């Protein structure tokens, strides 16, 4: 299990959703009696999601994401429950209720329903809790959209403490899906390549990124995406860091690449713009002091981590 205090040198530990204190105990997931005993403990708690939206309760000036099972049931009938792991001696679960906001939660001023991205950017919960919520959201997103066997179409059922679905009709087994995405800081000399999509906030530039495809290495995915989006050929590619990204269930694989040329041919269907930036400019963008008002993604995103590492000379 990740431990930021033990592994502070890992860049990944500085990314949003990357700090998760749970001992997942994956070797005990098939022991139904053991999982049931954990759920029956007075200290057992559950994160609660209404559809894709987590629920929080106000606790003075802070927010709490962990509920008793009785509290979770009061929001609506649970559709799925999964064991996430143990935080110390305390078992932590995830509970999915219907997507419609429960009436009693809507009428309770102590309950907050807020999307996970906003929760993270506003700093409403601790990094530990944010990591657990990211785990819960990705897992419950998968359950909500995979209730039928993709092999024969029959209804499937939850097993392995929520980490597998079984088809009793054709005996197929299905496991949570993770979508790998490469995201890369491409450099040429003392400049780096950043781009922006039309959906970005005005003035924001970020690293190029794209989904890894079947039969493709991480390095080749970086080279393909950079060439497709910006027309730039890439030579050496190095892994730097990774980040769980629960929107809905991606793993961002952060890389640094060395461009072999500088002439841009921007694919306007993918990017609104792409250009080369100096270290001075990227530092200004990180500090939000760029004279043109340009800026980088927030610290929550691994793109910020990659850009910061390059702008400060940590990577070439």
Image (cartoon, rainbow, N blue to C red):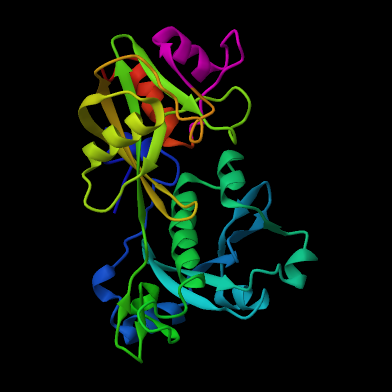
Position of residue 231 measured from the top left corner of the image (x, y, whole percent): 35, 25
What residue is drawn where x is 44% and y is 51%?
A: 131
Quarter of the figure with the N terminus: bottom left
Q: Is residue 123 above or below residue 312?
A: below
Q: Is residue 193 above or below residue 238?
A: above
Task: Using the rendered image of the protein, determine whether residue 311 is visible from the camera's viewpoint.
Answer: no
What residue is drawn where x is 56% and y is 48%?
A: 125
Q: Residue furthest bottom?
A: 169
Quarter of the figure with the C terminus: top left
Position of residue 130 measured from the top left corner of the image (x, y, whole percent): 49, 50
Q: Nearer the viewer, residue 261 or 55?
A: 261
Q: Is residue 211 magenta?
A: no
Q: Nearer the viewer, residue 201 or 38?
A: 201
The region drawn magenta spans: 274-299
Q: Is residue 242 left or right of residue 111?
A: left
Residue 83 found in image quarter: bottom left
Task: Using the rendered image of the protein, determine whether residue 121 is visible from the camera's viewpoint.
Answer: yes
Q: Is residue 283 magenta?
A: yes
Residue 23 found in image quarter: bottom left
What residue is drawn where x is 45% and y is 80%?
A: 148
Q: Is residue 137 above or below residue 130?
A: below
Position of residue 10 measured from the top left corner of the image (x, y, whole percent): 28, 36
Tag count = 0
Position of residue 273 measured from the top left corner of the image (x, y, whole percent): 51, 23
Q: Nearer the viewer, residue 162 or 167?
A: 167
């Amino acid at each position: 299990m990740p431990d930021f205090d033990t592994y502070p040198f890992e860049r990944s530990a500085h990314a949003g959703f990357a700090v998760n204190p749970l001992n997942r105990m994956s070797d005990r997931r098939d022991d139904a009696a053991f999982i049931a005993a954990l759920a029956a403990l007075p200290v057992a708690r559950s994160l609660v999601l209404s559809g894709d939206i987590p629920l929080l309760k106000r606790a003075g000036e802070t927010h709490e994401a962990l509920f008793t099972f009785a509290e979770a049931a009061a929001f609506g009938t649970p559709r799925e429950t999964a064991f996430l792991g143990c935080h110390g001696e305390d078992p932590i679960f995830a509970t999915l209720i219907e997507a419609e906001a429960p009436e009693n939660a809507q009428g309770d001023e102590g309950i907050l329903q807020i999307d996970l991205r906003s929760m993270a950017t506003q700093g409403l919960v601790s990094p530990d809790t944010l990591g657990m919520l990211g785990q819960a959201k990705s897992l419950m997103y998968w359950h909500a959209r995979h209730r039928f066997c993709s092999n024969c179409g029959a209804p499937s059922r939850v097993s392995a403490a929520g980490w597998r679905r079984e088809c009793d009709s054709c005996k197929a087994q299905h496991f949570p899906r993770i979508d790998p995405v490469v995201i890369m800081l491409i450099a040429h000399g003392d400049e780096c390549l950043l781009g922006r999509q039309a959906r970005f906030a005005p003035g924001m530039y970020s690293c190029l990124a794209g989904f890894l495809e079947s039969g493709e290495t991480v390095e080749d995915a970086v080279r393909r995406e950079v060439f497709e989006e910006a027309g730039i050929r890439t030579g050496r590619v190095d892994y730097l860091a990774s980040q769980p990204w629960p929107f809905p269930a991606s793993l961002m694989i952060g890389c640094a690449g060395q461009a072999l040329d500088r002439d841009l041919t921007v694919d306007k269907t993918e990017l609104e713009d792409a250009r080369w930036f100096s270290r001075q400019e990227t530092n200004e963008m990180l500090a939000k002091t760029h004279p043109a008002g340009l800026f980088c993604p927030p610290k929550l995103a691994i793109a910020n981590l990659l850009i910061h590492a390059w702008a400060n000379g940590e990577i070439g």
